[in-house]
Image (cartoon, rainbow, N blue to C red):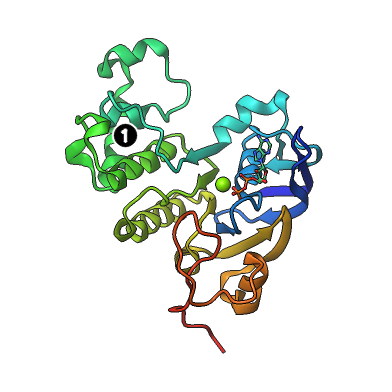
Amino acid sequence: MVIVSKLKKVFPDGTVALDGISLKVEEGQFTVLLGPSGAGKTTLLRSINGLVKPSNGDVTVDGIKVIDENYRKIRTLVGMVFQHFNLVGNLSVIKNVLSGSLGTHQKWWSNLFLFPKSYRIRALDLLDRVGLLDKAYNRADELSGGEQQRVGIARAMMQEPKVLLADEPVASVDPTNSSNILSLLRDLCKEKKVTVLCCLHQVDLALQFSDRIIGFTNGKLIFNDKTSNLNRDSLRQIYDETSVEGMFFGSDMKTPDISHIQWKE
Ligand SMILES: Nc1ncnc2c1ncn2[C@@H]1O[C@H](COP(=O)(O)OP(=O)(O)O)[C@@H](O)[C@H]1O
Ligand SMILES: [Mg+2]
């Protein structure tokens, strides 16, 4: 479980990225963070894995407070999936996945077979789960964007995290693959009871895959409820627009296109 309490982050230049956020994310839930660019989504995720130090308030993960002294422990509990995948391009796919296993020793990198057999089997099993077993020995940079993100997911799962943070995991992926990737991420996390916090720009994908939506603007919480309770008005508040509907949406646009969404009346 992730507990965020009165979290405030003011950057040295005076920018208030988070303005007293309190929330709880239940174990095993798939939560999507929505909000316009600059809302504070990335800062919130980085506060959960300890990369951003709060100005006020605190975060606990699985009962462990996110502070410097607990950094190693937090690293073992919290996995990451990145927008730009962050794979090592000139290494094989399987080595990239193995790099997710904690406690791997530097010397192992020279030879795949120095990794314990149980690790290699687990990495191959994860690659099978993400549909890339046949590419295990390809160089990572030979893969398409969608495939690289599936490797990124396998690498994160290799760590066996309790909590997985995903910052715009499909923003650099062909839109036709976005849904498959989120579906895979959701299935794997449900299966392994991993709690997910995922920032997305696409409201339709958030509605499709999340259990809960947390929406915020200017570092303030606007919406925090079951996904089925998100309606047009809450979305308008999140995106701070008088008319959310019918607007074009691209990954860098402020407002998503929700014109095709069927709302419950
Ligand atoms: N290292 C930093 N120094 C100063 N301001 C920052 C820094 N990181 C983020 N910000 C600012 O904090 C606010 C929230 O940013 P961010 O968390 O990246 O938002 P989002 O991910 O929702 O787009 C923005 O105004 C951004 O410019
Ligand atoms: Mg961001």
Q: Secondary structure at mark 1?
A: helix
Residue 2 location in percent, x, y?
66, 48
Res 70 → quadrant: top right
Query: Relative to residue 18, is residue 205 depicted above or below?
Result: below
Residue at 78% x, 44% y is 8
Give the camera-side residue of 33 and 228. Answer: 33
Res 227 → quadrant: bottom right
Residue 210 location in percent, x, y?
51, 63
Give the camera-side residue of 141 and 133. Answer: 141
Query: Relative to residue 215, is residue 72 depicted above or below?
Result: above
Q: Is residue 31 left or right of residue 23?
A: left
Bin the neighbour count of mark 1 within 10 Å (Cα to Cα): few under 14, some 14-19, many 20 and up: many
Query: Relative to residue 216, is residue 131 depicted above or below?
Result: above
Specify the farthest residue to the top.
107
Q: Is residue 253 left or right of residue 93?
A: right
Residue at 33% x, 21% y is 116
Q: Quadrant of the C terminus?
A: bottom right
For the image shown, how many numbered marks are present on the structure?
1
Residue 245 location in percent, x, y?
52, 77
Specify the farthest residue to the left.
134
Specify the farthest residue to the bottom.
265
Q: Which residue is mark 1?
A: 123
Residue at 41% x, 33% y is 86
Q: Is mark 1 within 8 Å of ligand 2?
A: no
Amino acid type, mark 1:
Ala
Residue 141 location in percent, x, y?
26, 32
Q: Is residue 130 left or right of residue 259?
A: left
